[in-house]
Every structure is written in structure tokens, then in C-alpha cells.
Image (tube, grey):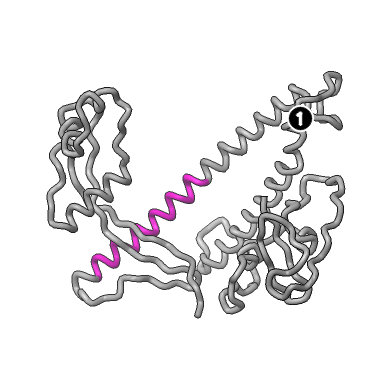
């Protein structure tokens, strides 16, 4: 567990695995941790944050600005959020920032709720007559329902993660295709894309269809990789789709053909996104 601590003297924020008595920067006395109080509702923030930041759920910008070592010029400006609309918005980035702040608030809410109930879940002692949570721990019935809602939240967040990842990859694919087309007419064109908050590095990688296990094509690849047939026949080895693409791309860059056994080969267009560091 880590603790976000703020020095009142130099105003620096530190994220450390333990609370410190003196500021690592100016050696001033750090604020003394207040005794924990029983949370009144599920909106309580995580204990890892300083009391100053427990008054409200941190927005996305505030959370990122707590990053240790972040220069003043690198911190994100606090802007008026845009309204979330049902149709496409002209200022799509401002609308996305608003949604990200809502996601950060939801993260704080859910994480704080899970954290404050961890001890109840870990406790092996409970009152059999209590269907809810007692001073010692939750009953089996209540823990069954708690685990069920954890599963529901897990499924919902996982489906949302898949949707967001798909759009991220689609953005990267579109950027890489555009830049590839532009480079055909101008080989000296700058490939790197610089946005207001991030940079994107487009690239073209080769990929190929993977053969099914225990087919002749499968053994052609394992033979090329010098894997004994008796080991490959056990089925313990599995060709990784992403790693295979990296392998084939490296062979193509070195002027070599991929080993026999792979199916149809095709290019994939990707972009690596990074947070922009302002100078």
C-alpha cells in the first residue's frame, strides 16, 4: 500500500510505501496522520490519500497532477468541462476529458468501498445470526452476495475495457494508415503525431495466421524453433499472436522470410500513444 503525502512547507507531494515524519525534499515536519474514523457511507475516499484530498473525489486532472516529480509546466490545466452529449460533439476532446474525470471519480468511489470492507471479507469470525456485516465479519450469505456483485462489476468493467481498447486500436490504425499513405508521396514526412496531451508513433507490422496445434504446419514452426517433436506433441507450447507478429516483422526487417507453416501474411497498422511532456 502507498500513501500520498503533502508537505505544508514546500507543497511537494510524495507517494511512498510508508508515512514519513520529515519531508524528503526540505526536511520539514510532515503532517501527523489523524486517527481513522469509521466511514459513514460508500463515498469515502481511499485512506491512502492525504486528508486535504479526501474532501472530494479527485478528478482525472487532479489525480494526474499528484504524480511525483511532475514539473509545474507539465501539470494539466484545470479547464471548464464540456457537457456530455448523446450525439457527436465538435469539441470531442473536451467531452472525453469530462468523461475521464467521471471515471476517476467512480474509481475512487469503488476502490474506497472495496478497501474499507476488506477486513470484513478476510475475517474468519462472524455472527451466524446476522445476515449482514457484524463487528467481526460478514456472514457467509452476505459474503456470497458481495462476491456476486464483485463478479457483476468485474464483467461490466471488463466489457467497458474491451470497448475502449477497440477504439484505441482503431485510432492507432487510422493514424498509421494515413501516415503510410502520406509517406508514399513524401518520404521525408514526419511520422510522429503530436496532440495537445499526447504523442503518437505510427508503425506498420507484419502478421500471419497461426496454424492449429498438431498440424503439419504447426510442427514446421516448432521444428524451425528447434523444439523437440515429443515436447511439441504434449501441447504445452502455444504460439502467441502478438509475439509472432513481432518475430515475423523482425525477420522481414532483416531481409529474411518467415518459416514455413504460417498462413496468410498481412500488414497491421498500429500507433503507440504516450503522454506528452511539455518543455
- How many marks on residues? 1
SS at mark 1 in the image:
loop
Q: Is residue 275 located in the magenta-colored stretch of the structure? A: no
Could you tell me which residue is drawn at 70 percent across and 57 percent down? 3
Could you tell me which residue is drawn at 47 percent across and 47 percent down? 163
Q: Is residue 59 left or right of residue 199?
A: right
Could you tell me which residue is drawn at 65 percent across and 72 percent down? 78
Q: Is residue 238 left or right of residue 138?
A: left
According to the picture, the residue beneath numbered tag 1 turns out to be 123
Q: Give 132 or 251, whichever is nearer the viewer.
A: 251
Residue 12 location (% of width, % of height): 69, 72
Could you tell me which residue is drawn at 35 percent across and 71 percent down? 192
Task: Give the magenta part as a residue range.
Answer: 161-182
- Magenta stretch: dominant SS? helix
Is 121 drawn above or below residue 204 in the view shown?
above
Residue 145 location (% of width, % of height): 70, 27
Q: Give 85 or 49, whichever is nearer the viewer.
A: 49
Q: Is residue 167 located in the magenta-colored stretch of the structure? A: yes
Amino acid at each position: 500500500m502507498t500513501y500520498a503525502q503533502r508537505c505544508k512547507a514546500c507543497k511537494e507531494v510524495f507517494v511512498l510505501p510508508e508515512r514519513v515524519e520529515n519531508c524528503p525534499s526540505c526536511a520539514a515536519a510532515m503532517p501527523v496522520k489523524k486517527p481513522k474514523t469509521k466511514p459513514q457511507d460508500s463515498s469515502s475516499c481511499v485512506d491512502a490519500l492525504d486528508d486535504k484530498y479526501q474532501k472530494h473525489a479527485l478528478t482525472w486532472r487532479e489525480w494526474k497532477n499528484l504524480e511525483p516529480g511532475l514539473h509545474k509546466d507539465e501539470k494539466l490545466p484545470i479547464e471548464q468541462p464540456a457537457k456530455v452529449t448523446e450525439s457527436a460533439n465538435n469539441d470531442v476532446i473536451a467531452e472525453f476529458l469530462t468523461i475521464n474525470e467521471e471515471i476517476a471519480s467512480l474509481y475512487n468511489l469503488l476502490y474506497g468501498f472495496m478497501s474499507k470492507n476488506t477486513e470484513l471479507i478476510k475475517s474468519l469470525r462472524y455472527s451466524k445470526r446476522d445476515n449482514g456485516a457484524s463487528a467481526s465479519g460478514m456472514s457467509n450469505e452476505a459474503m456470497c452476495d458481495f462476491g456476486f456483485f464483485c463478479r457483476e462489476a468485474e464483467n461490466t468493467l471488463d466489457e467497458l475495457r474491451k470497448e475502449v481498447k477497440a477504439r484505441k486500436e482503431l485510432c492507432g490504425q487510422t493514424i498509421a494508415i494515413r501516415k503510410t499513405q502520406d509517406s508514399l508521396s513524401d518520404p521525408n514526412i514526419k511520422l510522429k503525431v503530436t496532440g495537445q496531451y499526447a504523442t503518437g508513433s505510427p508503425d506498420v507490422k507484419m502478421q500471419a495466421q497461426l496454424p492449429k496445434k498438431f498440424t503439419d504446419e504447426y510442427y514446421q514452426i516448432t521444428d524451425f524453433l528447434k523444439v523437440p517433436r515429443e515436447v511439441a506433441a504434449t501441447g504445452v507450447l502455444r504460439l502467441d499472436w502478438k509475439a509472432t507478429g513481432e518475430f515475423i516483422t523482425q525477420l522481414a526487417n532483416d531481409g529474411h522470410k518467415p518459416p514455413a507453416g504460417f498462413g496468410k501474411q498481412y500488414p497491421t497498422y498500429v500507433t503507440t500513444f504516450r503522454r506528452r511532456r511539455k518543455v
